Each structure stands twice: as C-alpha cells, then as structure tokens.
Amino acid sequence: MRALLLHTNRFESRLVEPSSRPVAIEPEDPSGSNGKMTQCLSVLFCAEKDDATKQLVDLYHEILKTAEELGVQNILISPFVHLSSSIASPAKAKALYEQLLKKMAETHFAVASSHFGYHKSLLLDIKGHPGAFRYREFY
Amino acid sequence: MRALLLHTNRFESRLVEPSSRPVAIEPEDPSGSNGKMTQCLSVLFCAEKDDATKQLVDLYHEILKTAEELGVQNILISPFVHLSSSIASPAKAKALYEQLLKKMAETHFAVASSHFGYHKSLLLDIKGHPGAFRYREFY
C-alpha cells in the first residue's frame, strides 16, 4: 500500500464518469460524500496486490499520527490508483477503502471522502511548509 | 524513476524556503522559471537511487508521447521527491532534472519548470477525463 498524505488548504473533486476499468470495478453510489474539504489532511491512497488488513491498519495509524502532528481536525480520504504499477483488484481496493472509512468514522475527526470508481477532476491546494507532503509505503 | 503525468488546467507553485534535506542538497537559483503554467501537461517526477540517463530518456519519450496524445502545447516539469522511498542523491536528482530541462528545451513545446530543492506550496487543478492522470515507472 502506498499513500500521499498532504496538508491541504483545499481538496475538491468532481465526478466526470464511472470508471470502466479495471474490468469488474463497481463504482460507489455517488449520493454520499461530496468530495470536498478545506483545511484538511488529504490522504490519497493506493491499494496494491498483496495488501490486507495489516497494511490498512498501518495506514490508519499513520493518518492519525500525521493529523495530530499537523493539528488538523478535517481528514479527506481518497482512493488514488496512480501511485503503483501493481494495484489491487477493484473488489479488494473497494473493500479496503470501505474498511478505512469505517475506522475513520470512529475517530473524533471530521471525515470526508472522494468517490471510489470514477474518473474525477481534482483540485489540490497543498501547503508548502516542511512536512506538508508525506509519501509512505506500507508492506 | 517514477512519475505522475497530469493533464492540468493549472499548475502553480510558490517557494516557501530552501530544503535542507537530504544533506548536501543544492537548491536551484530561484531567479529562473516562475513555476506557473495553465492548460499544460504537468510532469511530477521522482529520481531514484539506481536511475541513469536511460531512465531519463524513457521519461522524456513518455512525456512527448503523452503531450501529443493530449494535444497540449505547454509542459511543466517539476521535481517531486514524494513518489518513492528509494530516492536518488540530491546531486544525481539535480543533474537528471537539469538534463531533462535541456532536452525539453530542444522540443517545439513551451516548457516551464518548478524549482529544484525548495519547500513549495503547490496548486494542482487536474482535468477529470480518462487518461488525465498517468502514473509511470521507468526501470
């Protein structure tokens, strides 16, 4: 599992169309989160072939640690397939995404998410202080 | 070498302070490019430990191919260390960055760059069509 943890002024995504690849991908019901947040930690994460709950829990702890360090109250979770050439199956990626959202909902943070399974535009306004960009791998 | 090739409405970076890590990093003279471009292919690339000219040339060809496919005339080149946990030395990363800019200057594209060796804020406004986000690895 790979992830970019970004300290952002703004995260904003807009659905363009459901993804048709990889084959068998099941886009999320679009009626939930609106995919927008300000003054937040934006988590772009990429589930890989061999990922299981262990990697997800490691990411979860890294998110909490980073949010505390940065002093943010808002966390935006976005599936982001563009960090690896060895990505998980759509079914596994979706299950891990849903598992992460469930765990995040049990925290005291305000949590938003950006839809799974869509082509989306993305506006990222990332702060520039040391530590505003963090790349992490979990194996 | 790893890279994100993004079809963007806007790329805008603002220098915050010179990087002090990794040790021995030599930030670029900031008087050159202003780190801004619109309607462009934004190339965020990360030089890794074992990279040499071969990987850079592969990236260069991928950039030209992608720009032709997307029909863009503007290309923004940005060093981006946050795509790997096995990054090149600062000296090698800077040399590869300068080599890429030199090759790009010989093309018919309008080329801008975002400074090497700084903490920077970053605004990315990325289009949402299929193919607007491309992750590539060159080994």
Image: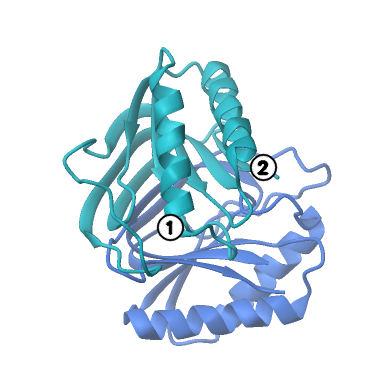
Chain colours: A cyan, B blue
Could you tell me the amino acid type at mark 2? Phe
Left or right, B80 with reference to A8: right
Q: Chain of mark 2?
A: A
In this rendered view, identify the residue nearer to me: B4 or B37. B4
Eye-nearest disc, 1 or 2: 1
Per the rendering, the mark at residue A138 is 2
Identify which residue is drawn at 16% across, 40% down: A31
Residue under pointer 1: A90
Do we see residue B122 in this rendering?
no
Give the Cα distance between marks 1 and 2: 19 Å
Identify which residue is drawn at 58% across, 37% down: A53
In this rendered view, identify the residue nearer to me: B137 or B22. B137
Could you tell me the amino acid type at mark 1? Pro
Do we see residue A105 in this rendering?
yes
In this rendered view, identify the residue nearer to me: B109 or B4. B4
CB contact under 8 Å: marks 1 and 2? no
Local crowd size for mark 2, using a 10 Å CA cut-off: few (<14), some (14–19), many (≥20): some
Left or right, B25 with reference to B10: right
Q: Quadrant of the C terminus of chain A?
A: top right
Residue A115 appears at what percent x and percent y?
Answer: 30, 46
Per the rendering, the mark at residue A27 is none
In this rendered view, identify the residue nearer to me: A27 or B12. A27
Secondary structure under tag 1 reads helix
Q: Chain of mark 1?
A: A
Residue B59 appears at what percent x and percent y?
Answer: 60, 77
